Amino acid sequence: MISFSDFSMREELTRAISDLGFETPTPIQQKVIPQLLSEPIDIIGLAQTGTGKTAAYGIPLLHHVDVSVRHVQCLVLSPTRELCMQIQEEMSKYGSHIRGLRVTAVYGGVPISGQIKDVRANPQVIVATPGRLIDLLERKALSLEHLKFVVLDEADEMLNMGFREDIDVILKNTPAREHTWLFSATMSNEVRGIAKRFMKDWKEFSVAAANTTNENIDHQYFVANHHNRFETLRRLLDFNPGIYGVIFTRTKQDAQEVSEKLMKMGYMVSPLHGDMDQKMRSKVMERFKSKQLQCIVATDVAARGIDVNDITHVINYELPDDPEVYTHRSGRTARAGKSGICMSIVSPKQISNVRQIERLVKQKFHKSDIPDGAEVVRKRLFFYLEQIANAEPAHDFAKLYHDSIHETFAEVDKDELIRKLIWLQLKDTIDAYQNTDDLNAGYEGKDKDRTRGNKYVRLFINLGEKDGLTANTLLKFITESTDIQPNTIDRMTVRDMSSFFNVPGDAAEFIMEQLSTKKFKGRKVRLEEAEQRSFGGGGGSSSGGERGGRPRPGGSGPRFSGDVRSFGGGSSDRGRERSGGGDRGGYKGKR
């Protein structure tokens, strides 16, 4: 087996790598490092996130640096501030024994004056985001005239973020550039276009396929209707009390909104996205790395700077459009030989997307049921019991408070004391999950909804036959605009100027919110609960007073997906927000 000691590199690098405890290089490092140490050439390295690409190019770069020359010799371009800072930190560690070496990072989101001072100190290596580097070049604070090596890290992501023109400008301003090293997770046409324009006789090293089949990741998916995504996320968090993970959203707005809702409910989470300033993003990462946060809610771009080996879970709040992005996300867990879980919340319409990703990662995904209330309470009970069993109180604690404790509980039976302690810890969870819905999207059709007894709400919509509306077009408009399953829409009535339809009570607000932003044949849509309007008049024929309706026995009262009443406590309405207590996520007192 190859080890780092087999590589012929300068003695200072060997010492630093030994200090860091590195022994066996990763597949991309095994392929790239020997080539770049012995014979620097233009290369393309294809490997997923988390495969050790920084060391793959960082070690050879530092091997070839001449510290006696006070000019910028090496440039590493990265797409995000977080990744830029991370690369600079890692390369400084690799070069910790090289006297006179300076590695400087420049990126946006912070005052440029301090960075101008840093680059004028003549570092040999600069790690930069494209935008800030061009800013420095335009201010003539930095010269790339003596630059020999350029590394494009996460090249596909830089192109996705719109940095193509910036990359062109930068590479055209490196007249002395001898070698270009391009690293990417995928080899898109745009990436290949960069290679053709700016690289010569490059050699390609690929380990991307091997990384997509990390057998230490358990891929799970949970099928929920679109309007139940957030409730499903909450339940998954509650069902995994020891979670330490990343929740991925598609957009910056989703990351902000989801994290804000979770924080209001007492979860120790924080957003991480590009609209946050650098100081705030750095603070979030510090809190996450120190485990003051259970989870961060991040966009794909912002997550490129996350380098944490202990992440237990990755949760896809929504599947990415590009299956390749899934491998980036799931690769955040199960690092350094550890195991991890990647959970995805999908709608019934997205099952085909799951199958597509399965083919890409060459692993079978496990369809899992969204846990019911009783399961959540049981899981948290056993988690709490395990914490008690494994607790090791400080020796002085028993001495200081022994008399007070025994005096207070002298007359309390041991079993009663245990029940009281557990009740105090779990009462909020029990209250919240007393009467909970079954969030699993049904495949059995209407009959399953009848048995759940969910209250239905009748909605008014300002569209009718004069708008060209029929029962079928109304159903299609609702389902395509909201991702609601057709069998959840009931008793549609289409009249001349307006229409009515029934929806589950827990979906009514979501449907109104989604449809109110739409237009139908150029007409702005307006919805209200039907109780607020008169049902009389309106004209228009409908068979039996209902057009296209599918009669369904009504039902009222709470829907039970599990009996948690045996644990005591009162009941609560669905969606009730929890407060107080110290139960959430196993982070006692830090909810």
Image: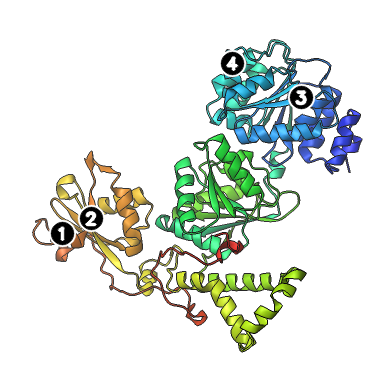
First-in-chain label (4 vs 1) = 4
**Any mark on residue 533, and which?**
1
* Residue at 76% in and 32% down: 91
- Vertical order, 55 against 65 (above or below): below
* Residue 527 appears in the figure: yes
Residues at discs 1 and 2 in contact (Cβ within 8 Å): yes
Q: Circle 3 — which element?
A: loop
Q: Is residue 589 above or below residue 79?
A: below
Closer to the chain start, of discs 3 and 1, is 3
Whole-angstrom CA distance, mark 3 to mark 2, is: 64 Å
Amino acid type, mark 4? Val
Above/below status of 411 relative to 201: below
In the image, 200 versus 94, the foreground residue is 94
Residue plotted at (35% across, 62% down): 506
For label 4, the residue is: 169
Provide the residue designation for mark 3.
102
